[in-house]
């Protein structure tokens, strides 16, 4: 496993895919991260909203959108943008990603650390457990001004 913890902006990462936390209902939060996402990839956001409002996402799902470079990977860790990112949803999303990455051809991921600030240690442990034997390279960005 290659999990590196980075500081700085995930937007400057030279990577195959960006992993971001999303909610199941298809609505983005009001954070600078989600504002930048909407500015950079409005088609992604439109597709995400449509799928979320159509009930196609459940907490713990992983959605890979390949229509951009880098790919965008949505980790569905909340029911709504204002709801808490529950550890069980984060764990399920990471475990889903740990089984999907091979079949999807993913080899390099820049991930904004999901979850609440008080859960960081647990989320880092979940990441280590989910990707312990994986050759997937993951650069985790701890603070993206949520």
Image (cartoon, rainbow, N blue to C red):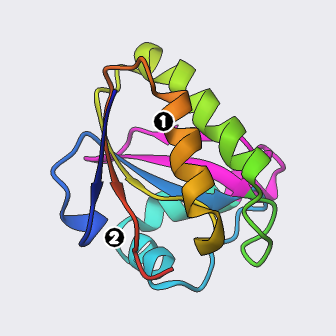
**Residue 124 pos. (x, y %):** 51, 49
Residue 81 left/right relative to 48 = right
Quick check: can you spot residue 59?
Answer: no
Residue that appears at 40% across and 73% down: 143
Q: Is residue 51 magenta?
A: yes
Residue at point 55%, 19% (across, down): 99
User: On screen, 14 above or below 144?
Assistant: above
Horizontal and vertical percent position of residue 43: 46, 60
- In the picture, the disc for residue 47 is none
Query: Which residue is label 2 attached to?
Result: 40
In-image side of 71 versus 32 (left or right): left
Foreground of the two, 132 or 59:
132
- Residue for badge 1: 128
Q: Position of residue 37 (x, y in %)?
A: 42, 70
The reply to whether residue 126 is visible in this rendering is yes
Per the image, label 2 sits on a secondary structure element best described as: helix
Closer mark to the observer between disc 2 and disc 1: 1
Give the tally of numbered discs. Answer: 2
Residue in the image at 69% along x and 70% along y: 27
Determine whether label 2 and label 1 are within 8 Å by CB. no
Q: What quarter of the picture does the N terminus occupy?
A: top left
Task: Confirm whether the magenta stretch covers residue 128.
Answer: no
Please provide percent x and percent y for residue 130: 55, 29
> In whole angstroms, how far apart are the C-alphas of marks 2 and 1?
30 Å
Q: Which residues are magenta?
A: 50-77
Q: Quadrant of residue 66?
A: top left
């Amino acid at each position: 496993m290659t999990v590196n913890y980075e500081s700085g902006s995930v937007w400057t990462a030279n990577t195959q895919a960006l992993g971001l936390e999303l909610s199941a209902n298809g609505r983005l939060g009001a954070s600078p991260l989600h504002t930048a996402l909407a500015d950079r990839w409005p088609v992604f956001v439109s597709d995400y909203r449509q799928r979320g409002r159509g009930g196609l996402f459940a907490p713990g799902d992983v959605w890979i959108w390949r229509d951009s470079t880098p790919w965008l990977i949505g980790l569905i860790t909340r029911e709504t943008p204002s709801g808490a990112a529950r550890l069980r949803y984060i764990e399920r999303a990471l475990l889903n990603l740990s089984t999907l990455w091979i079949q999807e051809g993913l080899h390099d991921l820049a991930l904004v650390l999901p979850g609440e600030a008080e859960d960081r240690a647990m989320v880092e442990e979940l990441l280590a457990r989910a990707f312990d034997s994986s050759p997937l390279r993951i650069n985790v960005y701890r603070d993206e001004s949520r």
